[in-house]
Image: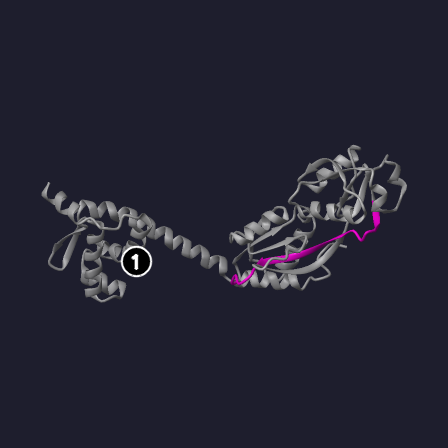
Amino acid sequence: MMHQQRSAERLSPYSDTEDMTMLLAPRLAYFAGVARTEHVTRAAQELNVPQSTLSRAMVRLEQDLGVDLFSRHGRTVSLTPAGRTFLTSVERALAEVRRAADEVRADADPTTGKVAFGFLHTMGVETVPGLLQAFRADHPRIRFSLVQNYGEAMIEKLRAGELDLCLTSPVPDAPDLVARRLDEQKLRLVVSVDHPLATRKRIRLAEAAEETFVTLEPGYGLRRITDDLCKEAGFTPRIAFEGEEAETLRGLVAAGLGVALLPPPAFPRPGVAELTVTAPRAVREIGVAWLEGHPDTPPVAAFKKFLLSRRGNLLPT
């Protein structure tokens, strides 16, 4: 009872969990070293710190926690029950820190590191696999974490540190991002094979003003481009269906549910005809973006250099 009372009286004034963590963290490796050797002098030698520094650190640790971690017997020490309980969690925490350190070092390794790379759904069938195949010819052991998403979602992931680079459209213009235009992709007006326009090879977009459109949902870059092109052509599209995948929209078009402005498919799609839009100029720019001021690991720097070298030659011909 008296020991519990002394411990209560010694409780640290720090009540905030974050403050306590910052206070204790630098001393945890010292504590584990002393607990392992049960000898302050040997622990100081193994940890390569002065014995006096180590002794003071252990005293401060006990004071901050408000409990006795060691029973002292001259230069040797032994763990108290509270010390054994604390050691179990400390060893687990230190092992997690070591694992995390090993992981980030591995990700930054020039030869075997990792790149977190995002890209549009429409580039996942052919463009990105071709890029990765070409890059890995010279960097066969670099690993990739791949994320497919629409443009705005990828920009959010860049800002959150979840992506190193992303291929997106339109090319973003924001002060906290760096973006480089790499290529452009022609958009076509896609109609069903039994549509009256299906026999045409070319069309002015204004000729589709009375058509019903199927489009991607708001927030997608291609949706914004579709709206802007229709506005330039002098009309606001009447939208019947909104989706998340270009190939889903092609299926809707093939079913006669509307027309769509889409990039070329990776493989010909039966049931639709694809018309060249002569006016306005119907293209979407493809660019690579990254966070301004974000330091690159060697693998990211290598892949970024590779992507920039593909300007004008990014998309399959």
Quarter of the figure with the N terminus: top left
Residue 266, visible in the rendered structure: no
Q: Residues within 10 Å of mark 1 (few under 14, many from 20)?
A: few
Q: Identify whether 125 is placed above or below 31.
A: above
Q: Give me the residue at 63% from left, 49% from top.
A: 151
Quarter of the figure with the C terminus: bottom right
Residue 85, visible in the rendered structure: yes
Question: Left of 254 or right of it: where is 148?
Answer: left
**x and y percentages locating residue 165 in the rendered image:** 58, 56
Taking depth in this image into account, of 214 and 105 the one nearest to the observer is 214
Residue 75 picture quarter: bottom left
Q: Give me the residue at 27% from left, 48% from top.
A: 15
The mark tally for this picture is: 1
**x and y percentages locating residue 242 in the rendered image:** 69, 37
Question: Left of 18 or right of it: where is 138?
Answer: right
**x and y percentages locating residue 107 in the rendered image:** 49, 57
Residue at image mark 1? 26
Q: Give me the residue at 42% from left, 56% from top.
A: 102
At label 1, the amino acid type is Pro
How is this picture coloured? Answer: one colour
Residue bounds of the magenta highlight: 275-295
| Residue 290 falls within the magenta-colored stretch | yes
| Residue 78 falls within the magenta-colored stretch | no
Residue 312 picture quarter: bottom right
Q: Identify whether 113 is placed above or below 209.
A: below
Taking depth in this image into account, of 173 and 133 the one nearest to the observer is 173
Instruction: Label 1: state its secondary structure.
Output: helix
Q: Main secondary structure of the magenta part?
A: strand
Q: Give me the residue at 19% from left, 65% from top.
A: 52
Taking depth in this image into account, of 294 and 210 the one nearest to the observer is 210
**x and y percentages locating residue 216 in the rendered image:** 69, 41
